Structure formats: C-alpha cells, structure tokens
C-alpha cells in the first residue's frame, strides 16, 4: 500500500502540539527544563484542543472529504500556536475550531442520525461550551468536565459505531444514553457547583466504564486469534478500566482545584482512558489519514504496558503525596507515548514498503 503524504502537514500540526504539551506537562510535574512564556500554563489546552482538537476533526475531514472541513484542524492549529504569543487570540481560535467540529458533526448527524453520531455530536457541543467558558475566563478546573465530556463522548460514539455488529439491545442503548446524559449534567453542574458536579460526573464516568467493559466489542475480542484484533481489544479494556478508576476518584473526592488528587483523577481519564484508546485506534486512524497499513508487531505491547505501569506509579505517587514517584510516573507516561509514536512510524514505513 502506498503512503499518501498530502495530509501529513495536518498530522504534523497535531503531533507538534502533543510534543509541546508533553514538554509543558513535565514542567508542571516539577522537572527542571528550559521554558518560555505561556508554555507551562498551556499544557491542558494544548493536549485537549491542540493535539486532539486537530487530530479528531482531521480524521473526520479525511473520511467525509468536504473541503471546508479541512479548515477546522487549521483553525485549531492556529489556535494552539497563538497560545504562546497571544493567549486570548488562541482561546478565540480554539473556540472557533470547536464550533467547526460541531458543524462537521452536524453534517454527520444529518447523514446518519444514529446513537453513535448523536453521541459524538453532544461531545463536540461539550467541547464548544468548555472552550467558550474557558475563553470567557473560567478557570480550567471548573470547565474541565466539559473537556472530558468532549473526549469521552467522541471516543464513546466511535466505539458505539464500531460495536454496531453486536446489535446492542434497546435497553443497552437506553442505559448508555442515561449515563452519557448524566456526564453532560455533571459538566453543567460543575460549572456552578464544582463539588456536586464532579461527583455526578464521576458517577457517570464510572457507569460508562462499566457499560463499555460489559457491552463493547472489546469484551468479545479479548481472546481473538488475530493478534492485532486482540491487541486492540486489550488496549480498549485497559482504557475502560481507567475510566472506572477516574469515576471512582471524582465520585469520592468531589471538587478538585489543583495538586496531586486533581492530577490523579484527571489523568486517569486523559492518559489512562484517552491514550489507551489512541493506542488501540491507531491501526484505524493512521491508515485512514495516511492511506498506509499499520503492520502489527508484538513489541506494541511495550508502549501499552509502559503506559499503564507508569500511570499506576503516577497515581500511587499522587494519592500518597510522594512527589518524586509522581514525577517519574509522569516522565514514563511520556516515554510510553514517544515509544508509541516511534513504533507507529516504523510500522507504517515498513507496511508501505510491502
Ligand atoms: C503524558 C503525560 C502528562 C503529564 C506529565 C501531565 C502533567 C500534568 C500536570 C503536572 C498537571 C497539573 C496537575 C496539578 O495541578 O497538580 C496537569 C494538568 C492537566 N493536564 Fe496533564 N499531563 C499529561 C498528559 C495529559 C493529557 C494526555 C491530557 C489531555 C488529553 C492532559 C490534560 C491536562 C489538563 C486539562 C490539566 C489541567 C490544567 C489546569 O488546570 O491548568 N494531560 N497535567
């Protein structure tokens, strides 16, 4: 299969945001590194709206192929770059980017009004609301449930789509819709009452985690004879497990503003769930964008195992207030992500030569 490099600049815009975000993440962890103005503070927006805010609309634009849709990752890309020079401009552009994503989802829902597109549409709406409130000056800890809702429902919608072959019953769909609605309600509530909103959002994350563990295609494929299918299922399973942990933490701890507990609960979602899902979906995302097949190598388990072990280390460091342990956990989280990127590039290049 031949590599198609025309979407590579878009992909590079996403990966570059990820690299800056990881650099900022290490600064936030307390590692002494060179820095510049506005870098450390931009970590969260760079990860959520920079890296994923470019990657997710890009994947949609490549799938649907309407020219205007490619403007969305460009606006989000201009937004994250502006965060360094003119943060208010960056916030406006990222909010516009999220509106663009909502418009893309509008097209998708119109074409295919199903539970999976509607779930992703609500996810995109959550991104718009979160970005708008953040642009208006709300602190991140108060709007972060909106960003989590964006990512959890976007990924959740994608999983519903891929699990359609299992033909979920009406009862299962109703249960999913109820828990997803509770997640949105948690984000709304957290904007006014952080404590109650975090607990409701936590309960919803817990519910969604259990729902996916029970009903997602992953539970069927965990012993699949095909090694790639099995690997993807194991990635997904790990991600759902972290969703349950995150939900339990938010439910138990309630309002979180900063510090180690905040770090643990947030990154159980952002690293444990989101990155495990990215690892698992990369054999779908990258071939779609680059037209190249990903060849599976058993060494892929190295970055997956490192991701989970390092996150366990980080969360233990957080919950026991041992900052050295947490620092190393964070550094190893990033090592796992870099290893994933390196092995993915290797696999794509190798696959394209066969
Ligand atoms: C991969 C390694 C990562 C490291 C080392 C890291 C590090 C950190 C640290 C130290 C904090 C501050 C926590 C505190 O207040 O004590 C933080 C906050 C945050 N992180 Fe990460 N993070 C990582 C990955 C991610 C990812 C993947 C996402 C999103 C997809 C993310 C989103 C956020 C957000 C939204 C905040 C809150 C920012 C704020 O309140 O200003 N992080 N991160």
Image (spheres, rainbow, N blue to C red):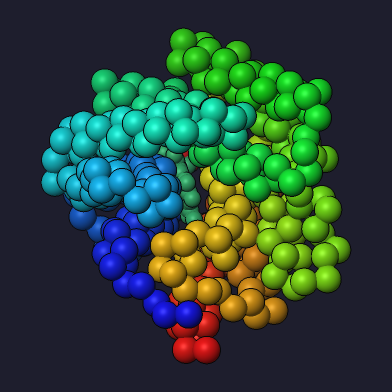
Residue at screen point 76% across, 52% down:
218
Residue at screen point 77% across, 71% down:
226
Residue 292 % position (x, y): 47, 73
Number of dots carrying numbers: 0
Residue 246 % position (x, y): 66, 37
Residue 194 % position (x, y): 52, 17
Whether residue 324 appears in this view of the structure is no
Whether residue 41 appears in this view of the structure is yes
**Camera-side residue: 187 or 257?**
187
Q: Is residue 301 above or below residue 129?
A: below
**Does 168 sit left or right of 38 as displayed?**
right
Q: Is residue 261 above or below residue 241?
A: above
**Does 244 sit left or right of 25 as displayed?**
right
Residue at screen point 32% across, 72% down:
5
**Does 75 sit left or right of 148 as displayed?**
left
Q: Quadrant of residue 79?
A: top left
**Camera-side residue: 135 or 122?**
122
């Amino acid at each position: 299969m031949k590599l198609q490099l025309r979407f590579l600049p878009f992909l590079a815009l996403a990966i570059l945001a990820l690299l800056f975000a990881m650099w900022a993440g290490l600064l936030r962890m307390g590692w002494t590194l060179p820095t510049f103005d506005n870098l450390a503070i931009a970590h969260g927006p760079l990860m959520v709206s920079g890296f994923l805010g470019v990657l997710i609309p890009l994947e949609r634009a490549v799938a649907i192929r309407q020219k205007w849709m490619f403007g969305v990752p460009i606006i989000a890309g201009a937004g994250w770059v502006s965060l360094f020079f003119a943060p208010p401009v960056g916030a406006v552009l990222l909010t516009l980017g999220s509106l663009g994503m909502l418009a893309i989802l509008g097209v998708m829902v119109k074409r295919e009004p199903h539970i999976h597109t509607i779930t992703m549409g609500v996810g995109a709406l959550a991104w718009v609301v979160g970005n708008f409130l953040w642009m208006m000056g709300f602190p991140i800890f108060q709007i972060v449930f909106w960003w989590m809702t964006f990512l959890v429902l976007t990924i959740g919608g994608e999983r519903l789509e891929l699990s359609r072959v299992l033909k979920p019953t009406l009862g299962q769909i109703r249960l999913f819709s109820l828990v997803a609605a509770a997640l949105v309600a948690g984000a709304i509530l957290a904007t006014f009452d952080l404590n109650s909103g975090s607990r409701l959002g936590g309960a919803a994350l817990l519910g969604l985690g259990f729902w996916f563990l029970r009903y997602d295609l992953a539970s069927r494929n965990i012993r699949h004879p095909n090694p790639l299918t099995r690997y993807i299922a194991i990635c997904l399973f790990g991600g759902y497990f972290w969703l349950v942990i995150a939900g339990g933490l938010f439910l138990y701890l309630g309002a979180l503003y900063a510090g180690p507990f905040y770090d643990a609960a947030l990154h159980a979602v952002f690293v444990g769930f989101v990155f495990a899902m990215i690892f698992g979906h990369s054999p779908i995302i990258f071939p779609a964008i680059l037209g190249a097949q990903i060849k599976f190598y058993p060494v892929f388990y190295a970055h997956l195992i490192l991701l989970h072990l390092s996150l366990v280390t980080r969360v233990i460091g957080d919950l026991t207030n041992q900052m050295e342990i947490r620092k190393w956990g964070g550094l190893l989280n990033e090592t796992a992500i870099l290893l994933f990127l390196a092995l993915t590039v290797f696999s794509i290049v190798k696959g394209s030569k066969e």
